[in-house]
Image (cartoon, rainbow, N blue to C red):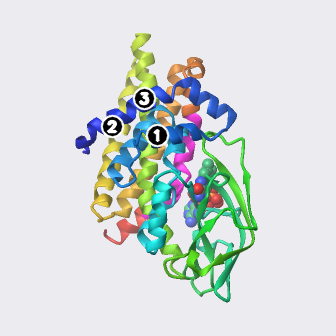
Amino acid sequence: MFEEYNDYRKTIRDFALKEFTDGVAAKYDRDEEYPDDLRKKSLSLGIIDMQNPAKILIAIEELCRIDAGLGISVTTPYFGAEVLMLFGNDEQREFLNDVYSGKYILGLGVTEPSGGSDVAHIKTTATKKGDKYILNGSKMFITNGAIADYLVVLARTSNEEKPHHGLSTFLLNTKLNGFKANKLEGKLGVRATNTAELTFNNIELSKDDLIGEEGKGFYYIMTFFNISRIYVAAQALGIAEGAFDKILNYVKSNEIKDENTMFGIADISTRIEASKELTYNAASYLFKFEPRPQLTSMAKAYAGETAVYSSEKAMEILGVNSLNENVERIFRNAKIMEIWEGTSDVEKLIISRFILKGE
Ligand SMILES: Cc1cc2nc3c(=O)[nH]c(=O)nc-3n(C[C@H](O)[C@H](O)[C@H](O)COP(=O)(O)OP(=O)(O)OC[C@H]3O[C@@H](n4cnc5c(N)ncnc54)[C@H](O)[C@@H]3O)c2cc1C
């Protein structure tokens, strides 16, 4: 699947091999610094094409295969764009051109200190006052939080019997008074990505900052996750493949032939192949505008678990050499694949709900 993009895949791979060397990746990981120079370089070469979802998928997979911290950093300045693309007004969609060109960095704030899975019960409020909304609350673990120019933010605009009916999405300019971002450090993995805790203190939003209709925010975010989970599956697939590359290289160059390692190679390659089939299959439905959320959740959960499994196996097979072969970074980067944009538990709940409905 997606063979028509093989030349593009090679272009991305060559870029990653040249720019994401182990030394560069280790430096950004150690310093916990966002690689803005690499973001700009990838933009100037025009290798990330936001107008073509298949190309985004392939770019994410290939970049994360070489290094996930850097790969995710250069492909997430657009995080949240689909909410504006699908539900924004003409002006907000127009604004996206400045995001795609790299002028602005975007992010998406849903998770709060009280938790991320239970989206319906978020506590941040946007209270209507005349033709303004006053935003108060906090968000936790927000990618690009301290570097974003704008954020798509989910907030409660009314208290309804069903809590998810009272949520709305806004486009927040981070220069507004009352916005504060506190960069989080000491993450287990993807340390090159910027992650922040945000506080909103009486931020005045105009009614033009509302995205779509009031009260529809929960649905917009769920629609977004059904898209973005495909890209997380691609991140995870790339990590699993990257770990496997390290294993193959090590086993071949050291002529390792024991049965245990052979079983490991068979097992990992099978799981990677299954993850790839699931991810590409779910993506092909989504890109035809016929999303199948249960397939998307299967891909995200299975590829996430495969990333963790493969990187753990790489640590075991390479043993002490996993340190100087930069495998431990892959192992640390893998874990988030089972957590963000829906934990594996949450994905499994979605899958079983759809299966029981007979879909
Ligand atoms: C580096 C990083 C970057 C992130 N970037 C963003 C971002 O840009 N924007 C954003 O909004 N969020 C972001 N997140 C947050 C991420 O999406 C959440 O961590 C994730 O949704 C899980 O939420 P939680 O960590 O609060 O865990 P919780 O929701 O508290 O869950 C804890 C545990 O309980 C389980 N659980 C929860 N509910 C159920 C249930 N109903 N049934 C069964 N089990 C359940 C979960 O599976 C999990 O094991 C980021 C997180 C990290 C670490």
Disc 3 marks which residue? Answer: 244
Disc 2/disc 1 C-alpha distance (Å)? 14 Å
Q: Residue furthest left?
A: 4
Left or right: 188 with respect to 217?
A: right
Label 1 crowd (10 A; few <14 / some 14-19 / many >=20): some
Left or right: 245 with respect to 9?
A: right
Left or right: 130 with respect to 308?
A: right
State the mark number for residue 42. 1
Q: Which numbered mark, 3 or 2, is in the foreground of this view?
A: 2
Quadrant (top left, top right, bottom left, bottom right) of the N terminus: top left
Q: In the displayed structure, would residue 225 be above or below residue 53?
A: below
Left or right: 28 with respect to 298?
A: right
Label 2 crowd (10 A; few <14 / some 14-19 / many >=20): many
Q: In the displayed structure, would residue 299 be above or below residue 168?
A: above
Q: In the displayed structure, would residue 1 be above or below residue 114?
A: above
What amino acid is found at the position of numbered circle 1 in the picture?
Ser
Q: Is residue 306 visible?
A: no
What amino acid is found at the position of numbered circle 3 in the picture?
Phe
Label 3 crowd (10 A; few <14 / some 14-19 / many >=20): many
Disc 2 marks which residue? Answer: 9
Give the magenta part as a residue range: 331-350
Sequence order check: which comes first, mark 3 or mark 2? 2
Q: Secondary structure at mark 3?
A: helix
In magenta segment, residue 190: no
